[in-house]
């Protein structure tokens, strides 16, 4: 094709637009940057830099895969989340900006140099847990997931972020086998999509992301029914929790946590002004079982 950087970006945008894909401008830029080993600054300051034949071939492959609705995160094998870069693949959910709300909620309640323990249930790629630990150098965390493949991704991410020494990763069924009153903070982004809704999702999610991390049962609430009492069990008195929810699940999930005995239960909206995180605490006067 004999393309330079700006031509490559224009070609990529048109290819994705013609395929009817949402967000073609950002996707095109990310794919061009990766294929051409360029930065956003390079595209602006050196727009006429030529791509090598190999770089053009790589871009063509990337675009063909994206047109087939493979997520950009899978094509590139990575995704930015909060202030960190994570490796991702088909074994884990691609971390989304919505989920950063969980990180924000916890960071606002934990002073930077406080030592505390954090449990991430359904840790996946490690996005939530590692983003928090990266900002809280005295904290230590445990990530639990039923998928050994997901845990392998989380281990890689912890290692390349230099956080492996402060993270333990365990294959398990939610809180099964964990001791009472053992954590200061518990977070989770559980599966919360109703079974009948799964087939209506965008192909990037429906066809490429693990069903185990998406499907929440007939009404999407199965995980919360189990997690609400269990999160309160493993939290220390005075401990805090934050769980991601679907946009229409606020009342139901708040009720489950109140029924389990949680205090200060509230819902926080994300940057798109949708209900996104139910948070609360364990009564500091409780002494545990």
Image (cartoon, rainbow, N blue to C red):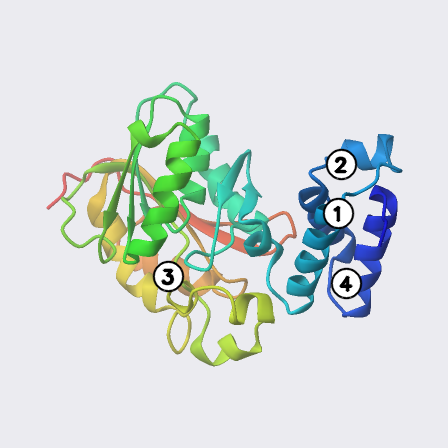
188 vs 14, nearest the viewer: 14
Question: Are circles 2 and 1 on residues that touch, CB within 8 Å?
Answer: yes
Label 2: element kind: helix
Point out the frontmost of discs 3 and 4.
Answer: 4
To which residue does mark 2 refer?
A: 40
Question: Are circles 3 and 2 on residues that touch, CB within 8 Å?
Answer: no
89 vs 276, nearest the viewer: 89
To which residue does mark 1 refer?
A: 29
Spatial separation of the CA atoms under disc 3 and disc 4: 43 Å
Point out the frontmost of discs 1 and 3.
Answer: 1
Spatial separation of the CA atoms under disc 3 and disc 2: 46 Å
116 vs 208, nearest the viewer: 208
Tell me which label, 4 or 2, sits earlier in the chain. 4
To which residue does mark 3 refer?
A: 255
- Categorize mark 2 by other alpha carbons within 10 Å: few (<14), some (14-19), many (20+): few
Spatial separation of the CA atoms under disc 4 and disc 2: 19 Å
To which residue does mark 4 refer?
A: 16
Spatial separation of the CA atoms under disc 2 and disc 1: 8 Å
Spatial separation of the CA atoms under disc 1 and disc 4: 11 Å
């Amino acid at each position: 094709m004999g393309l330079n950087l700006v031509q490559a970006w224009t070609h990529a945008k048109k290819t994705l637009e013609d395929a009817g894909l949402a967000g073609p401008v950002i996707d095109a830029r990310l794919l061009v940057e990766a294929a051409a080993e360029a930065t956003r600054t390079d595209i602006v300051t050196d727009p006429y830099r030529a791509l090598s034949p190999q770089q053009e071939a790589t871009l063509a492959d990337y675009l063909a895969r994206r047109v087939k609705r493979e997520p950009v995160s899978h094509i590139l094998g990575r995704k930015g989340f909060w202030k960190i870069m994570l490796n991702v693949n088909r074994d884990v959910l691609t971390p989304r900006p919505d989920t950063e709300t969980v990180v924000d909620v916890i960071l606002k309640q934990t002073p930077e140099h406080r030592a505390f323990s954090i449990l991430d249930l359904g840790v996946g790629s490690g996005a939530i847990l590692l983003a928090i630990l990266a900002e809280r150098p005295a904290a230590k965390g445990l990530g639990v997931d039923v998928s050994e493949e997901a845990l392998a991704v989380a281990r890689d991410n912890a290692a390349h972020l230099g956080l492996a020494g402060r993270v333990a990763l365990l294959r398990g069924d939610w809180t099964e086998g964990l001791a009472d009153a053992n954590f200061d903070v518990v977070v989770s982004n559980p599966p919360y999509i109703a079974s009948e809704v799964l087939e209506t999702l965008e192909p990037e999610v429906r066809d490429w992301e693990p069903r185990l991390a998406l499907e929440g049962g007939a009404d999407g609430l199965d995980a919360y029914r189990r997690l609400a009492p269990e999160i309160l069990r493993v939290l220390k008195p005075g401990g805090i929790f934050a769980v991601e929810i679907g946009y229409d699940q606020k009342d139901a999930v708040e009720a489950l946590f109140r029924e389990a005995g949680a205090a200060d239960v509230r819902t926080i909206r994300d940057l798109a002004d949708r209900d996104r995180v139910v948070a609360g605490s364990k009564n500091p006067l409780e002494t545990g079982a």
